[in-house]
Amino acid sequence: MPPAPELISPRSPRVSAARRLAKRNFRGKERLFLAEGPQAVREAAAHRSEGRAGLVELFATLEAAERYAEIVGEARAAGARIHLADEEVIADISTTVTPQGLVGVCRFLDTGFEAILRTRPRLVAVLAHVRDPGNAGTVLRCADAAGADAVVLTDASVDLYNPKAVRASVGSLFHLPVAVGVPVERAVAGLKDAGVRILAADGAGDRDLDEELDKGTMGGPTAWVFGNEAWGLPEDTRALADAVVRVPIHGKAESLNLATAAAVCLYASARAQRAVGGCRSVTV
């Protein structure tokens, strides 16, 4: 017979501790957060920081443990505590409407801003005043896909470890350095000192992305600053940038949402940097 779930009651101390991580103040106190679903749990188990795995605990239904036996094995190999739980327990911990049967408890993994600067980054996404966790996670995913070296969340942006942000990143949170709580002025100044050009993405920008690409100005180290979903970037933040760039709208759409605009901008830089003469191109 299959083993009975180890955690029968949602009132178990381990379940209660995990459930509290849905709240920001408890996440900050414990420096732990939740990652749900097979992709996020797999990435957490593979992640290493200072010799430690990112995954601390794994709660799994019996069905999910059987379906994702390889992931459970990776979690166990990473030293995570494995808890078989009934669906009631998983539903109690999960923040999704339809849980996938796997919920991981993970260590915070943000990186110090100064450590990012020491790597001499060539492509960075700076999230300034981004309040929607889904957008923040999606931009992080776009930055990862475009080959960015780091992401910076300013002190006016959403919590990196908000469950919606973690889900929207689809595991990319574990792939690249992310600094949090950095004042936008400090972020811009530090990146400029590191030789990075600052481009603010704004629909009302006086520079056109296509024109910048045509002029060949985007092959060097670049940081894109993205603003709030509803009102964009404040004037004082735009003033910090070397240029304010708009994504051209060739059709009848009124605008692009934040994540889509970020994907376009980051990929434009990635392509320019990999072209002949770009900062990532290989020359003899």
Image (tube, rainbow, N blue to C red):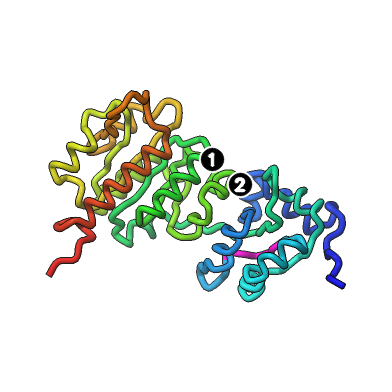
At horizontal 31% and vertical 57% (from top left) the residue drawn is 121
Q: Position of residue 212 (x, y in %)?
A: 18, 40
For the image, the number of numbered tags is: 2
Q: In the image, which residues are magenta?
A: 54-58
- For label 1, the residue is 133
Residue 236 on the magenta segment: no
Task: Name the element at disc 1.
Answer: helix
Q: Position of residue 262 (x, y in %)?
A: 37, 41
Quadrant housing the C terminus = bottom left
Task: Name the element at disc 2.
Answer: helix
Name the image quarter holding residue 233: top left
Q: Residues within 10 Å of mark 1 (few under 14, many from 20)?
A: many
Type of residue at label 2? Pro
Residue 180 vertical position relative to residue 211 in the rendered view, above or below: below
Of the image marks 2 and 1, the number of the one nearer the N terminus: 1
Residue 139 vertical position relative to residue 12 in the rendered view, above or below: above
At horizontal 29% and vertical 34% (from top left) the residue drawn is 247
Q: Position of residue 248 (x, y in %)?
A: 27, 31
- For label 2, the residue is 163
Quadrant housing the N terminus = bottom right
Query: In this view of the protein, which residue sits in the foreground, 121 or 215?
Result: 215
Residue 243 vertical position relative to residue 7 in the rendered view, above or below: above
Callout 2–callout 1 Cβ contact below 8 Å: yes
* In this rendering, position of residue 14 left or right of residue 32: right
